[in-house]
């Protein structure tokens, strides 16, 4: 038989007729079926179930992201753009994204006019200004740079105290770090803070949330300071700067 597949000199038909009435034939059929079932289970059924569960998880995750996007859309639609612009303007005045020398000089001038002191001299410590990302001076606040200014004021103790309080309650934000002097000539060193706008990365696993109550209270306080600063008449000091020329 040319169609037979020979093993040595015997074909498969030979072994079939030879062992079909033997108990080994039934064992081999059952064993073959069992092995085929195992192969089918591990190579077909289990991978299909795994793939189905994986697709199901992706569908659930996608549905959750769609629900979050829908909530974000409703949240953004209900926002008041005028309020947002006002809040952005307030925080920009509090922590300028760039080096705002004119705003700082205006703040110092208005504080001097309000307190009644006279400015005899002032100096800037601007540090390295060759790069936008350079830190003006070291601060204890992460991601915040500062500009150090030293002014010499002439006035009474009460006037100097009013000047310091006005500086610390106006925008841009400032901190008094050193007070030195005697009599009516007092040297005051202050830090004006600045912080660039960060890169915004919106989360995809949770919806947007409104501003927390404590931050709203802070924004309201900054807005009051900003309004008070804006209503003050502005006139820049005409003293000479010891570090850089201003005019």
Image (cartoon, helix red, strand yellow):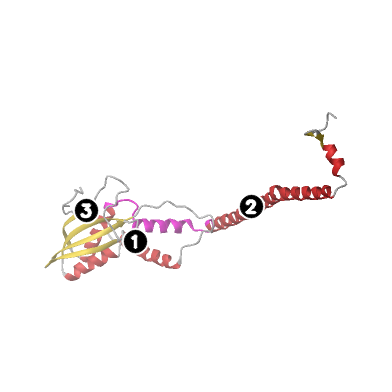
- Where residue 93 appears, as percent x and y from the top left, is 34, 57
Looking at the rendered image, the disc whose residue lies closer to the viewer, 3 or 1, is 3
- The residue at the far front in this view is 9
Residue 31 magenta-highlighted: no
Q: Viewed as shown, does residue 44 lie left or right of 82?
A: right
The residue depicted at 45 percent of the width and 67 percent of the height is 213
**Alpha-carbon distance for marks 3 and 1?**
25 Å
Residue 142, located in which quarter of the rendered image? bottom left
Q: Secondary structure at mark 1?
A: helix
Q: Is residue 2 above or below residue 95?
A: above
- Where residue 188 appears, as percent x and y from the top left, is 19, 62
Task: Looking at the picture, tell me which residue is in the foreground, 235 or 28.
Answer: 28
| Stretch in magenta | 76-101
Could you tell which of marks 1 and 2 lies nearer the N-terminus?
2
Q: Is residue 63 above or below residue 6?
A: below
Q: Secondary structure at mark 3?
A: strand
Q: Which residue is mark 3?
A: 125
Q: Which residue is mark 2?
A: 54
């Amino acid at each position: 038989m040319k169609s037979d597949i020979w093993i040595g000199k015997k074909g498969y038909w030979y072994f079939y007729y030879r062992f079909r009435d033997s108990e080994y034939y039934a064992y081999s059929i059952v064993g073959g079926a069992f092995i085929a079932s195992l192969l089918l289970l591990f190579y077909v059924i289990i991978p299909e179930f795994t793939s189905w569960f994986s697709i199901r998880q992706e569908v659930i995750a996608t549905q959750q992201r769609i629900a979050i996007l829908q909530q974000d859309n409703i949240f953004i639609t209900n926002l008041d753009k005028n309020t947002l612009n006002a809040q952005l303007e307030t925080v920009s005045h509090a922590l300028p994204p760039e080096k705002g020398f004119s705003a700082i000089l205006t703040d110092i001038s208005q504080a001097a006019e309000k307190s009644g002191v006279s400015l005899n001299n002032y100096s800037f410590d601007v540090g390295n200004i060759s790069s936008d990302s350079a830190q003006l001076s070291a601060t204890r606040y992460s991601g915040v740079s500062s500009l150090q200014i030293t002014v010499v004021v002439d006035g009474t103790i009460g006037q100097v105290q009013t000047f310091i309080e006005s500086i610390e309650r106006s925008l841009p934000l400032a901190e008094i770090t050193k007070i030195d002097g005697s009599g009516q000539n007092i040297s005051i060193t202050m830090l004006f803070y600045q912080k660039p706008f960060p890169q915004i990365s919106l989360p995809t696993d949770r919806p947007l949330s409104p501003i927390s109550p404590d931050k709203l209270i802070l924004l309201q306080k900054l807005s009051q300071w900003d309004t008070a600063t804006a209503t003050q008449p502005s006139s820049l000091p005409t003293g000479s700067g010891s570090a850089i020329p201003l005019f």
